[in-house]
Image: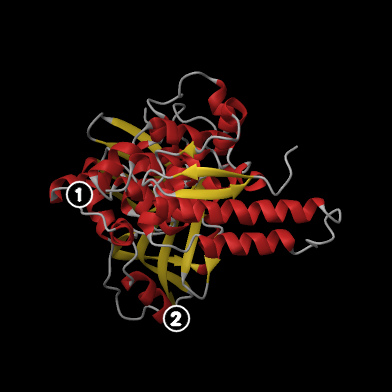
Amino acid sequence: MVSEEVMKAVFPLLDGVDLASCMVVCKQWRDLARDDYFWKCLCAKRWPSICKRRNPPTSSYYKLYQTFYRRQHHKPLLPPRISFDDLEFFIDIWAENRLLFSEVVPGSVLQQGTKISPSGVCEMLKCHLEGSEFKMTLPVEPRFKIPLSQTETVSISVLVGRKDSNKVAYVINKSMFDYIDWSLFRASAFEYLDISPAYRFLSGIRAWISLLFMEDGDEGAMDVFGIQLDFCDVANSKEEVLWLLDMLDWK
Amino acid sequence: MASSSKTITVVSSDGDEFEMTMKAAEQSKLITHMLDEFGVSDKVPLYNVNSETMAKVMEYCKKHADHEAAKEEDGGAAIGAGGEEELKKWDDEFLKVENGLLFNIILAANYLEIKSLLDSSCQAVADMIKGKTPEQIREIFNIKNDFTPEEEAKLRSENEWAFQED
């Protein structure tokens, strides 16, 4: 047994991590190390202003130190409040005044993604679709074609409805497919999301929607076989996407 | 005030007598106060310090007294720039003793009010603890783990913040 007096003289010289290790050594050390006085000293060294108040701002200086001594970068995400089963997406695609595609897509379908691409899809796109990262894609059946001359007139709107509160929110009000990536055979459109006023100051988060196509050389057209939705600005996992959707301005 | 050849006698808890110069004795605030109170003629009893520890403490006091004297002499020339560092090295070697004795030195330094010895010896123990896991600490200090597995698991999870790697 080490004398209590000795430990009381040594503990003030330790930093928080070492003092916490001492707590686990044996009962005597645990009881000594728990004395909030030592933690007050550590807090005083680290944040001298904290000790200008008589009492600790949290329940104890021990609690204060262990919570704030180091910034936690791995913040586990809380489970989202909605699931894809609660959602359905209303997708409409126009070329000028002609309706190319108009479907209600259940969230569960979009969440699954499509790993199987029809033959004729370029390798890069195929690899991208087969990859294990979370993606929201849906197959377009039957496929539709967009003549290359008309690609500049194609627009899309996406609304999302939620069954738990019977509300709807914009994902994309109306946007043109301005970005065509000819190496990946993707035509993309984006729009800035409308976030609920409960979360002020959040702006600049975009919804991206892409048409996945194969090139039809004969007809000079885009042969669209799939649609992909993503929020790559901020949300890249299933949980992150669900949280983001939960934060939309549902009306 | 007293000449450096003047000595006093201290008596350990085991009854052994030790002679120390005034300068060495002045390293201890307690002894200094006792001498002021009771004068130098009597032997100073130190009930809390056993002979083994007393011998070590005497060695420390003598070394530090000599060091101070040398500083005062040539205005510091005798010590030179490396003097303080050399003393620190001496202190480090001096404290390389078995744990039981080291703890007794801490207790004695505390009781005798020898601040520099208290600081160094406590720091030596702190250095033994720094960066170690609880298991390693138990081994170094030969401490028995008296927690039940449940108690230990609970404590570890409470202190997970300290054990996490970044």
Label 2 – label 1 distance at C-alpha: 70 Å
Mark count:
2
Q: Residues within 10 Å of mark 2 (few under 14, many from 20)?
A: few
Q: Along the line of sight, which residue is nearer the eye, A165 or B74?
A: B74
Quadrant containing the N terminus of chain B is: top right
Q: Along the line of sight, which residue is nearer the eye, A7 or B135?
A: A7
Which amino acid does the dot numbered 2 rest on?
A: Asp
Quadrant containing the C terminus of chain B is: bottom left
Say what secondary structure mark 1 lies in: helix
Image coordinates of residue B130 in percent, x first then y, are 44, 56
User: Which residue position is annotated with label 2?
Assistant: A218
Q: Residue at x 25, y 54 (%)?
A: B143
**Marks 2 and 1 close (CB-CB < 8 Å):** no
Measured along the vertical axis of the image, is residue B44 above or below residue B83? above
Along the horizontal axis of the image, is B8 left or right of A89?
A: right
User: Which residue position is annotated with label 1?
Assistant: B153
Q: Along the line of sight, which residue is nearer the eye, A191 or A79?
A: A79
Measured along the vertical axis of the image, is residue A150 above or below residue A65? below
Measured along the vertical axis of the image, is residue B138 above or below residue A168? below
* Same subunit, tags 2 and 1: no
Image mark 1: chain: B
